[in-house]
Every structure is written in C-alpha cells, then in structure tokens.
Amino acid sequence: MDLTHRPRRLRQDRVRGLVSETSLEPADLIAPVFVDATTDERRPIESMPGHDRVPIDGIVDRVEEVLETGVEAIMLFGIPASKDPEGSRAWAEDGVIQEALRRITSETDAYVITDVCLCEYTDHGHCGPLEEELRSEDVVDADGPACEPTMTVDNDATLEALEKIVTSHARAGADMVAPSGMMDGMVGAIRSALDEAGFEHVPIMSYAAKYESAFYGPFRDAADGAPSFGNRRHYQMDPANSREAMREVRLDDEQGADVMMVKPALPYLDIVSAVRREFDHPVAAYNVSGEYAMLHAAAEKGWLDLEAVGLESLLSIKRAGADLILTYFAEDVAKRL
Ligand SMILES: [Zn+2]
C-alpha cells in the first residue's frame, strides 16, 4: 500500500498547535451586559444562565467581573425606567445607558460599545416610532381597503431619533456605537450626526445583516424588548436571503460603517464567510441568546458538554471569518483560554 499522504501526521499531540489554523483570544470577544433602571438589585435572566440585569449602581462591579476574565470590550444594553411611543428615554441625558456609561468610563478601562436602537424604549417594542403602512391593495381597490392598514416603523423618523441617541451616547463616553434597528440609511445618518457633534473618532459597528430570527427569544426576556404586536420582518432580513445580505453590507460600507456585523452567528456562518470574502472591513458575528440558551438547556439534561460545545461554537464562528464575536459565552470561554 502506497500512502504518501497521511494527514494524521500533523494531528499528533505535539504538532497540533503549530498547524492550527484558527485561534481564539479573549481580545476577540465582546460580552453583552444588561443595565436595568427598574431594579435595585441584580436579577438573574432565567433563559440565559449566568447573566443578570444589573442596576445602575452595580454596573461598575459587573464590568469589572468581565475585565477580570481577560475580555476587554462590552456591549451595553439598557432597560429604561419608563417607555413611551417614541422611545424618548433612549436619548435622555439621565437615561439608563448614559448614566451607566459615565460610571463605566470613569471607573474602568473597558472598551464600551453601545447598542443603538429603540425597541427597549418604545412601549410597543418596535425599533422606532410607528406609522400606518399603506399597502397597494388599499390604493387600487375601489370597494375600499381589502384589509386594515398595518402599522410599521417609520424609517426616516427613526433616523432622527438614532441621531439623538448616538450623540448622547458619545457625550456620555461610548467608545463605539452599534446601530441594530436595520433602518435604511441608519449608518449614514449616524455618521453625520457624530461628525457634526465632534465625534469623528467614534467608530460605528453596524448590525449590517441582521435577520428576523427566532433565536433571539431569550434576549427578549433579558431586555424586555418583545414587540407588543406583529414582528420585525418589515425591517429585519428574511432568513432565506444571502445576496440581500451583501447588498445590506455594501450600503453600510458606502455610508461609512467601520465594522460589519452578522446576526445571528451559527445559523448564518455562510453569511459571515461571504462578508469576510467580499469586504475588507472587520467582521463581527453575534452569537445570540438562543444559540447560548440551547446549549445550556442540552447541558442541563446531560446531553452535551457545555464547555466543549461553547468553545467549539466560538471557534467555528472565528473559522468562518469573524474577527470579533459578541457572545454570552465570552467570560466563561475567556477564563479557559
Ligand atoms: Zn431594535
């Protein structure tokens, strides 16, 4: 038997590390952190074991816990004291994110990225103020509308709100802003608003290809962000589409996004990989709450080894082409690296 090619030669213990193609560092990871203006004490998030909603007074301690693991960056999500149809607490100078940012940036060295959206701040839970959507059948049917007009998010009114949010975040000390609402033109609007306010140095990580995914379920417990009616498919992407993702990323590129994010991660590794190939920006992938919760649930039943599958998940996301990974596993994995 002539077996010149034996790939097993390089799988021996002492050489595996030398030929490993992908490595994971704590510096690749971003830990999502939830700050909650409605509570005085830490509240565990049931569907996301190990994660809490923390009060503003506890945010510095929470961020220090993250930093101790070697993870240097956090993504900050806020739960406001009150909600209204416009989501006005999102840009309040004394808003939950703004208060938390001032404390984190003055007391820690964390690199703080803020999620920029309205869904946690509007009383209806959508990612911007609403307008009636006029559908074509409403116009052409002489006997009257075929069905009731539906409500959808008012894109351009939302852009004005996003401009106010990012400038208030930057003033409070945000290192980077991450618009997640999938509004058309959001990156351009935010870039101009930041530049005009003197924050040319603040980068934008765009949730460029964000899918309307059922894997976000547990996050909605965490951030009180479930829409009170309907769903988000009028603005988030159809899971069936990949060419459209390239178009979304290209638009964000043209508008000045610095980092391109794909969300979720594991069911969309083909998209992560395609964005890596087609664009020269750093690529971020969001390993979302459902991807985290399902592994925990299986591990609780004794069906999976949690440490192993958590690490393997992140490694696969990195291998697909992500430079940065947002993940609820950040601290657990970083501790072991
Ligand atoms: Zn949103």
Image: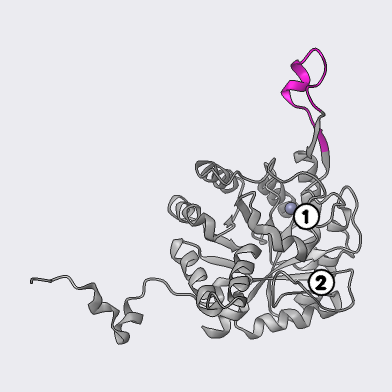
Q: Position of residue 304 (x, y in %)?
A: 53, 75
Mark drawn on residue 100: 2
Q: Nearer the viewer, residue 300 or 143?
A: 300
Q: Within 8 Å of ligand 1, the CB of disc 2?
A: no
Horizontally, residue 295 falls left or right of residue 19, namely right
Q: Badge 2 local density, few (<14 within 10 Å), some, or many (20+)?
A: many
Could you tell me if the residues under marks 1 and 2 are in contact, i.e. CB atoms within 8 Å?
Answer: no
Q: Badge 1 local density, few (<14 within 10 Å), some, or many (20+)?
A: many
Horizontally, residue 25 falls left or right of residue 190, namely left
Give me the residue at 43% from left, 53% from top.
Answer: 277
Give me the residue at 83% from left, 17% from top.
Answer: 144
Q: Within 8 Å of ligand 1, the CB of disc 1?
A: no
Tell me where residue 43 sits by quadrant.
bottom right
Under mark 2, the amino acid is Ala
Please tell me whether residue 71 is drawn above or below residue 244 in the rendered image: below
- Furthest-left residue in view? 1
Q: Is residue 280 visible?
A: yes
Q: Position of residue 292 (x, y in %)?
A: 61, 68
Q: Which residues make up the magenta segment?
A: 131-147
- Please give the count of numbered marks on the rendered protein: 2
Discs 1/2, front: 1
Q: Nearer the viewer, residue 128 or 157?
A: 128
Under mark 1, the amino acid is Ala
Magenta stretch: includes residue 197: no
Tell me where residue 4 sits by quadrant.
bottom left
Mark drawn on residue 226: 1
- Among the two numbered marks 1 and 2 on one chain, the one whose residue lies closer to the N terminus: 2
